[in-house]
Image (tube, coloured by chain):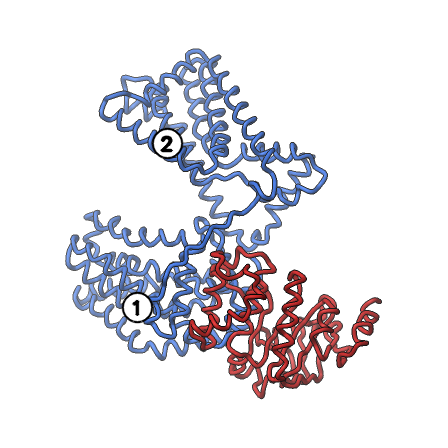
Amino acid sequence: MIQTTQLSKKYGKAEVLHIDSLTIPTGQSFGLVGNNGAGKTTYFNILLDLIRPTTGAIVNHDIQVNESEAWKSFTGSFIDESFLIGYLTPEEYFEFIGDLRGMNKADVKTFLSKFDEFFNGEITGKKKFLRDLSKGNQKKAGIVAAMMGNPQVVILDEPFANLDPTTQIRLKTIIKELTENREVTVLISSHDLTHVTEVCERIVVLDKGNVVKDIVTSTETLKELESYFSV
Amino acid sequence: MISHFLNLEWKQFFRAASFSKSLGAKILIGFFGLYFAVIFLFMGFGGYFALQEMYPDKDPLFVANSFLMYAIVGDLIFRYLMQKLPVMNIKPLLTLPIKKNKIVHFILAKSSLSFFNIMGLFFYIPFSIILISKGYDVAGVLGWLFSMILIIQCANFFNFLVNKNNVVFSGLVTLLILGYLVQHFNWFDLPGFIGQGFDAIYQSPFLALIFPIILIGLYVTNYRQLRNEIYLDAIISEKTKEVNASDLSFTEKLGDLAPFIKNDLRLMWRNKRTKSSIWMLAVGLLYGLFFYTNPMYLKLEFMYVLVGIFSTGTFLINFGQFIPAWDSSYYKMLMSQNFKYERYLKSKFTIMAISVVALFVLGIPYVYFGWKILLVHFAAMIYNVGVNTHVILYGGTFNRKKINLDEKAAFNFQGTGAVQWLIGLPLMILPMAIFGLINWLVSFEIATLTLAILGFIGIALHKKLMAAITKKYITNKYIMVHAFNQEN
């Protein structure tokens, strides 16, 4: 469970995020949508303790993220390409992350074999550095790395952007499988309303840092969101 | 149209994200440029008289001519190593309504004004002025100068045609060495022979007209080649090399530090910026030769400390001063991963400590200059491991500048701030001062021992020091995450 209370982030006088209360129960697939500057990435950055909140706090499975680092052992994330180490090959990168998450080489191999289809032969065995891969392929590597080591919380910022249609569909399947047993909480932000309504059971709309909508996904959700954004 | 291009160039220079931040570095580079310009000017004005003195029975101009082969071939080699046609930044222009011909002409014309072409003028022009003032035939000297300027331009365009072709490069090097050898052993005076060609230009200046023809030929060839290749899949593509992954499993012995150490080894080997710093190791290691071969320095015992600290600590200083900025491009990821910060710093410490010991071992041959030197180097090694590693790790908490690993190291001051310079002082000056003082007051042995003991104290306190340093890193975490996120 991820609890957010009285959270705000200000830069000077400008408030970029203000969430009084938001609770994400364990096992939920949670979608965050909003226009540019709505505060989606800021929220994720605070959740990952990469920036400090001005007020309030986020508690991730009973651990307040800016007080203790214990959340790191069960939280996997991919925010942007700066999460990749450009001078490593994808294999080396997975091995590195695996090492940090307590997986040995064999574990990493078994884990990666589940993603053969997702990788579509473009990631592993290519003898290329991550920095030389296309944006989409970099993203694939980053998303998979975020799922290493059986995390209980997976955070993906804009996972669908830059991916080809086939991979988008495969990613949706992967996310659905991940939340199937209701043990892994998945947080996704996206600009793409169709994708996010398809995989997320709950969608929160942010606007200028405030929660303006909190919807349990239904068949009507996409329409509702489209009409909200087509102002 | 040209004004558009020039406008873009101007903005590119002044609006580069690094401009205001690295203004100091730019000034420094400018200073180097100025330094060379002044040296060339000096050679240009003084060259005539120097040659006259060295070869009193010969005409200085003809002597200079007989050296020109070296200058021209050397220039080509230098260009081969340093100069590249700047094609990448025309990418955004390709889809705009600008004729490709114009773009190509612009890049070529711009290249002819490059630094490499200007520098030579600082020599040739004053040299010609002196010649004329000494009563040489004005038409002859002007013809000669004209030829020189055009030869520089020809070299410029020739270099782009060669385009990093190794065969041509080895040909040039061979020519240089061969020319020297045949001259040295009096078989055939190749440089002199070429020099006679230049003598002829002075005597009959109309011969200089051959160079415009060559230049036009080279320009047109360049133009044609470029015109056909400004496509994204031709010259305007960045080539990706296949990876040669080396087996680093030997690092597994280092236990839970292994993943970080493996990364650091790869970091150093696979990035332009770090790769060129590896050459610095050789410089640092051989640094002692500069001092020890000079009997004057050999008498100054405190200089042994400087050499000892520097030669065993080159890696420590080069690598250590940019911790944790080396990892700046993925610092966010590291900070959200599951590991103790101490482990990360410990890996950096280990890699530095190993390098210090390894460099000491490689420097053992310095014993040739006296056992005292080896003794001081040994003490310096202990001091480096015990004190300097911790100091430099502590200094790392002040790092606020991102490092772009893909850029080369020479003249690259990215990531450098005042801290880097300040931290250098205690690293080298402090041990030198301590040693010098005790050596002067007590004795050489005690002074050496003091250095070593200071090092041992540092090693004994390692755990405590690391804990304090780690704490400092953790307090600075958000500032560093934020700073490393900024392009500079």
Q: Where residue B486 sits in the image (x, y, percent)?
A: 58, 62
The residue pinned by badge 1 equals B385
What chain does mark 1 sit on? B
- Residue ID at (18%, 62%): B375
Instruction: Check the residue under mark 2 and report the chain it is in.
Output: B
Q: In the figure, is residue B224 to the left or right of A205?
A: left
Give the residue pinned by disc 2: B171
CA gap, disc 1 and disc 2: 46 Å
Q: Residue at x 38, y 70 (%)?
A: B258
The chain coloured red is A
Q: How far across and how far down the image is residue A146, in percent?
A: 55, 72
Q: Is residue B452 visible?
A: yes
Answer above or below: position of A108 versus B58.
below
Label 1 sits on what residue type? Val
Disc 2 residue type (three-letter)? Gly
Number of numbered tags placed on the structure image:
2
Compare marks 1 and 2 and give the one earlier in the sequence.
2
Horizontal relation, residue B59 to residue A114: left or right: left
